[in-house]
Each structure stands twice: as C-alpha cells, then as structure tokens.
Image (cartoon, helix red, strand yellow):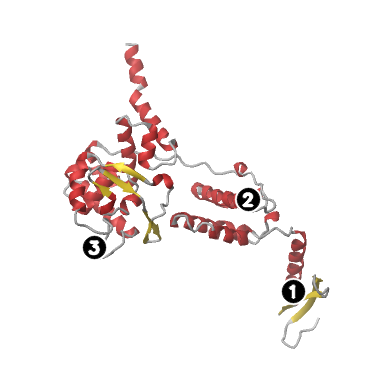
Amino acid sequence: MKKNSSGYYEKRLTYGRDPVTGKRLRKAIRAKSIKELDRLVFQFQQEQKVKASVPDDDITFESYSKRWMETKKGKSVNTVNMYRLMLDKHILPEIGQLYFTEIDRQRLQDIINLNFSHANTCNKIRLTLRQIYESAADDGLPNTNINFKRLNLPKQKKVVEKRACTPQEKAAIQTAPLPDQEKAFLFVIFYTGLRREEALALRPEDFDFINCTVSVNKVVVFDGNRAIVNYDMAKNEYSLRSVPLPPQCVDFLKSYTAGKEGFLFRDARSEIPYCRTAYQSFFRRIKKGLVPLAPTADTLTAHIFRHNYATTLYYSDVSIKMAAKLMGHKDTTMIVKIYAHLDELKERVTDKLAKAFD
C-alpha cells in the first residue's frame, strides 16, 4: 500500500447505499501508518455492524441523557448539579457512547462497582440512572426494563443520631449577647423549625405579627458559592406553608423587621441573601457567641434546630399530621420516625419493668 500525495495511507470503504439515489455510500479513511489505518478501518467496520443491529428508535445513552437534563431545568440548582455530576463523572464515561440496546444490568452494576467504597455516590448514581430509564421507557425506547432493585449497593454507614438542643444551648439562645441579625436568624430557626434555605429567603413582609405567623414561600439555593432565590420552591409544594410564631420570639422579630426592606439575612452591601461562604461565616459567628454559655454549641448545625423543633412539637402533643405540615414534609414518614424514637425514650420500658417487679 502506497502513501497518497498528502503523505497518508488511505483506504476507501463501501458501507451501504443511499436510500433515495441508490448510489453506493463510501468513506475514505486515512492514517499516517498502515497499523493505524488498519485500526481505524476495523473500528469503522465495527461501528457499522452495531448501527445495522440498532432499532430505528434506539439512541445513545449520552444523547438521551442530554435531552433528559433539559427537562430538569425547573428543579433546584443543587438537584440539577447532582444529576450533572453523576452523569459527567461516573456514568457517561462508561456507557455514554452505547445505545440502550447495548446496555444491560451488568453494565450498570459495573458503574456502581467502580464507586463501591462511596455508598452515598452509589445511591446517587442509581437514582440518576433509574430516573433516566423511567423517562426512556415513557418515551418508548427499547431495552429500558432494567430491574434497579437488583442492583447491588454498598451498605450505608450508620447515620449518627440527630440530636435536639441541650438545656444549656436553649438557655444560651435566650441570653447570649449576639448582634441583632444573628439573634434574629437564631430565633427563626429555633422557634419555627424552618430549613436553612427557607430562613435565608425571608423578607419583612413574610411576617404577620397580627396573627403571629411567618409565611414560607421561597428558598435560597447555592449554585457553587452564589446564592439564588428560588420562588418556585426547591423542595416541594408542601413546603409552602404558614408557621406560627411563639410569643417568646414575636416582640424581638417584630422590632428587628420594623423599617427593613429586602432580604433580612444579607450583607449590608448586597441586595441578595448571603452566599455560601458568607453564610458559613455568619453561622460560625452565631456558634461562637453561644459557646461561652454552652460549650457544645460549637457542634450545632441549622438542621439540629430543625430536629429540635420536631422534638418540641412532640412534647407539645402536636399530632403527627400537623407536625409534618408545620415542617413542610410531603408526608408523615420522617415525623413518624422522630416521634417513634421519642416514644421509646419516653416509655423507659426498663425502668418501668424494674419498678413493677420491685
């Protein structure tokens, strides 16, 4: 085989006929060496064999996943970023170039196996794959009946039990000499159980001090470091709610919001709520102000205050259904778990039995 005038080895291959004109379809393959040319010829021939066996309605996983991602634009930034990360880093490098008809359950299991030391990542990979396959099945694509329940996942590490605020921490919340903005945020998450993203989105008009309620109708989500206000609610429609304000926080919050405009928890030089790093510094300052009165406050998170609120609802004899509504849960599943755990603590079965047999 001789090189052409450009210095390349070349081979022309026929791979079919034009369905309209009937003319032969040909492709010229060029390479700098015979070995490289043979490799490219073989690769092209294999690709043609795969295409010949692919149904007309099939599509590569990468092409379909890009279309699927377009349907997720209404989701929260964090959710969309999670899907994109799972696809770009873990899924597409393994099966992106394959057609659905070429992908079986074992190929999906192989992706999970590559990340088996990271249980949380494996769960996110399976979630992303399952949602894509459910969408593909709705669109009538072939080979989408994968049984995701049969995918083998690593065991999740035991989650550290969520805690409520300690008596010392509760006392510190009332008496710590915090700046007004920090105290206002602390009062909101302590007395209403709002999620961090819900509290950061609050404005003065969200408070009704006549009926003593606060309305939850928007959230702040972080896209990287940037704060974005989502008025469509990032969690679910059940997050839209009105939460009562206990008398212990009404006077202070009424005074703090009076005369203010815009978002309550933001830098004085900005019109938007705190970005991620600014919020982290803000919350660290809150904990630092509490630590002298309650050393364990250094371990506090915004979610601990939310769990504390759920605990308070339990001991106030608020029903499971109402507790779920006040906390913005879709159903009572999470509240049932919390209430069941608190029931066990309240019962103190061992102590009761000891007294009974005394």
Q: At numbered mark 3, what does the secondary structure look like: helix, strand or loop?
A: loop
Mark 1: amino acid: Lys
Is residue 83 or residue 350 the one in the foreground? 83
Q: Residue at x 42, y 49 (%)?
A: 235
Residue 248 spot, x, y in % from top left = 20, 40
Query: Which residue has dot 1 on it?
Result: 35
Is 326 on the left or on the right of 40, as rendered?
A: left
Q: At numbered mark 1, what does the secondary structure look like: helix, strand or loop?
A: helix
Residue 275 spot, x, y in % from top left = 33, 60
Residue at the extreme bottom: 5
Is 100 on the left or on the right of 354, as rendered?
A: right
Query: Which residue has dot 2 on it?
Result: 138
Is residue 4 at least partly visible in the picture?
Answer: yes
C-alpha distance separating marks 3 and 1: 67 Å
Mark number, residue 114: none
Neighbourhood count class around disc 1 (C-alpha, 10 Å): few under 14, some 14–19, many 20 upward: few
C-alpha distance separating marks 1 and 2: 45 Å
Q: Nearer the viewer, mark 3 or mark 1?
A: 3
Residue 25 position by quadrant: bottom right
Number of numbered discs on residues: 3
Query: Which residue has dot 3 on it?
Result: 268
Mark 3: amino acid: Ala
Is 277 on the left or on the right of 127, as rendered?
A: left
Q: Nearer the viewer, mark 1 or mark 2?
A: 2
Q: Is residue 45 above or below residue 29?
A: above
